[in-house]
Image (tube, helix red, strand yellow):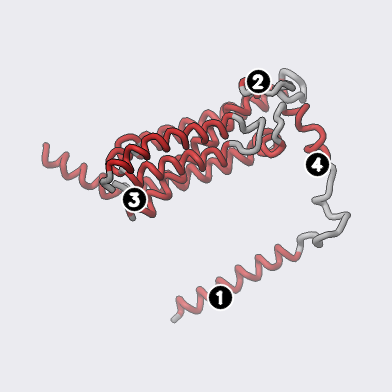
Amino acid sequence: MIRRVTSVLLTVILIGVLIIGVLELPEFGVKESPMNNEVIERYIEGSIEETGSFNVVTAIVLDYRGFDTLIEATVLYTAAIIIITVLMKKAEVRDEKSYSQRS
Amino acid sequence: MKSLILKEVNRISVILIFMFGIYIILHGHLSPGGGFAGGTVLSAGMILYKLVDPENSRRYFSFEIIQKIMATALTVYGSAKGYHILHSLLVEGHETVSKQMTYSILEGGTLVLLNACVGLIVAGTFYVLVSLFMEGEMK
């Protein structure tokens, strides 16, 4: 019972924190919002000369935002490694048994 | 599945799918596509092979090899990106590395290498995820 109440309270607090965070975002569709800056034109006009990539998406993902992609690849790698580590356990146990049988 | 026709057709079609995925990865800086899309195509080929021929796929795409390939790809990605940024900052003075205007694969500079690394990581991850959901557990 106490656990259920605390989980509900924690969820409400988390939702409140997230809503407070979302309220700070700039209004959608306003021209002066900070996401309408000079970066878009720079990407479209200068990406071929600056990066040598004809594909603008590749230029942004791998050149301008290269470290972002590094972290993204790290997340994927971590997910795969965790799945392998957690779920290969039975095979390891089997190997230990065979090792103990051999020795 | 134990159908002989399925296995033989699969052996040919998987090669074609791999070729298509490698094409998408290597042409990532020239045409639509790139590491993520090409890696997904590669993993689709591996998953098809696993569906048709589980025993051989366990031998060819074993998880130890996938682990090693993914770790190497991540290391190479980090080193290449660090070299790229340090080189462009220190040597060329705020200039980016490859200034080419020809429509060719090999003159893409580090972008080809980075795309290949991202493709390998994405392919390994999706293959591991799908084999998790197919078997419930590894091996």
Q: Is residue B42 left or right of residue B2?
A: right
Q: Residue type at mark 1: give it.
A: Leu
- Disc number lying in front (1 or 3): 3
Determine which residue is flagged by label 1. Answer: A9
Query: Which image quadrant is residue B56 in?
Result: top left
Residue at 51% x, 43% y is B40
Pick whichever of labels 1 and 3 is earlier in the sequence.
1
- Please state which of the two labelled residues, at mark 1 or mark 2, is closer to the viewer: 2
* Residue depicted at 68% across the width and 21% down the height: B87
Provide the secondary structure element on which disc 1 rests. helix
| Chain of the residue on which disc 1 is drawn | A
Tell me: A27 left or right of A88. Answer: right
Whether callout 2 and callout 4 share a subunit is answered no
Return the disc, 3 or 4, that comes first in the chain's sequence: 4
Amino acid under label 3? Leu
Q: Are marks 4 and 1 in contact (CB under 8 Å)?
A: no
Whether callout 4 and callout 1 share a subunit is answered yes
Same chain under badges 1 and 2? The reply is no
At mark 2, the secondary structure is helix
| Quadrant of the rendering where the N terminus of chain A is positioned | bottom left
Q: Measure the C-alpha gap from mark 3 to mark 4.
A: 44 Å
Residue occupied by mark 4 = A39
- Residues at marks 2 and 4 touching, judged by CB atoms closer than 8 Å: no
**Which chain is home to disc 4?**
A
Distance, label 2 to label 4, CA atoms, is 26 Å
